[in-house]
Image (cartoon, rainbow, N blue to C red):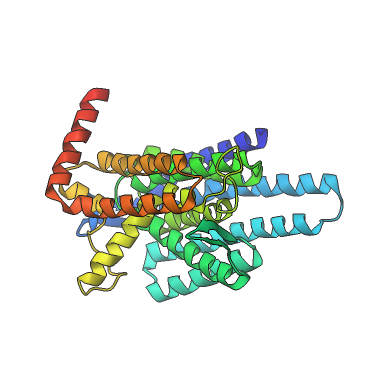
Amino acid sequence: MNFIIIASLISFFGTFLVMPSVIKLAIKKRILSPGGGRNAHDGFTPNIGGIAIFIGLLLSNLFLLGFYIQEISSESPFLDLDSFHKFLSYIIVTVSCITMFIVGLSDDLTTLSSKLKFSIQIILAFCLTYYGDIRIESINGLFGIHDLSYLVSIIFSMIVVIFIINSFNLTDGLDSLATSLGIYILSSFGILFLLSNHFYDATLCFAGVSSLFAFWFYNKPPAKIFMGDSGSLVIGVIIAYSAIKLCNFPVDTFGTINPVFILCVIAYPSVDTLRVFLVRIFSGNSPFAADRNHIHHLLVDKDFNHGWAAFFAVMYSIVLTLICFFLRENVTLSFIVLVSLAILFIVLPMASFARSTTKRFLSFFKELIG
């Protein structure tokens, strides 16, 4: 367990100590995100915080890979097939993060075409699912369906990888929103990996939490810097990798496997992305067209500050996670409840009564703890 603490500390300080230099570089080179329009902040803010996040994670992952190589070498001078596949998947995840960092940073600096980014994500998803064997093998009785065929498993898992990466990327729209959601999601995944004794994967998640926590000090309202695509895409890869692996692992000490529960943990970015795509399509626009129809944008437009909008998103995820946890033994029922609450969440920001009620509740909560 000590290596989890060491890797997390490396990630935290790697990000925290580099961040001031990244902010200075962004200001000097005018790598700034303007306020107004679809951006909810005011003025010009640096948007390449992902550089510091990536450096912290890379240093931590290099330590982790070195530790893993030393561990398997001490057991045997030759890799068995199982150890080889594990090692290959770890290398592929590392390379995927590096690739998404390069893509994200390029997009932050020059704006890449959506077709190019999507094509790279398809290749990355294929490498993760096929070569890394990171795939959803079963949906454990959801509507009577259990094991998936190999081809269906690959295709379905690729779609999930691409969806998760992009849905998390879309949360980087408010001060501390993506950071807070990333901390919650990766903390939850890290705990689940510990329950299954998958210590490498748990360490990867907790290193992500540490890096995001270090970044939060600079991203909390009013934000001094945003993570940008260079950060959100990297974190998205780690979340996608972890979510797909955990779909095959138990979510409690009794060995209960429920992929829907994993979906509940990442509910906010998933539901928000689906909602925005539906709104754009029904409005006759491209689902990939940028706008201010995200739930967090609607909350800010109704006089929620950035901190409370981020709090609302995290609390929604926590409540839904708890509900699904109590229903974890029934996969189909937990899915129906998830969809029902997701529909409610889609309608909520568009209903003036619901908005005013939510605002009064949050104001009361704020006074209670303040």
Nearer to us in this view, 303 or 228: 303
Q: Residue pushed farthest right?
A: 77
Nearer to us in this view, 24 or 284: 284
- Residue depicted at 60% across the width and 57% down the height: 94
Q: Quadrant of the C terminus?
A: top left
Q: Is residue 215 left or right of residue 41?
A: right
Q: Quadrant of the N terminus?
A: top right
Q: Is residue 370 visible?
A: no
Q: Position of residue 268 (x, y in %)?
A: 36, 50
- Residue depicted at 30% across the width and 53% down the height: 173
Q: Residue pushed farthest front?
A: 144
Q: Position of residue 307 (x, y in %)?
A: 28, 39
Q: Is residue 309 above or below residue 79?
A: above
Quarter of the figure with residue 169:
bottom left
Q: Is residue 200 visible?
A: yes
- Residue depicted at 41% across the width and 59% down the height: 229
Q: Is residue 214 above or below residue 54?
A: above
Q: Position of residue 10 (x, y in %)?
A: 58, 39
Q: Position of residue 69 (x, y in %)?
A: 75, 49
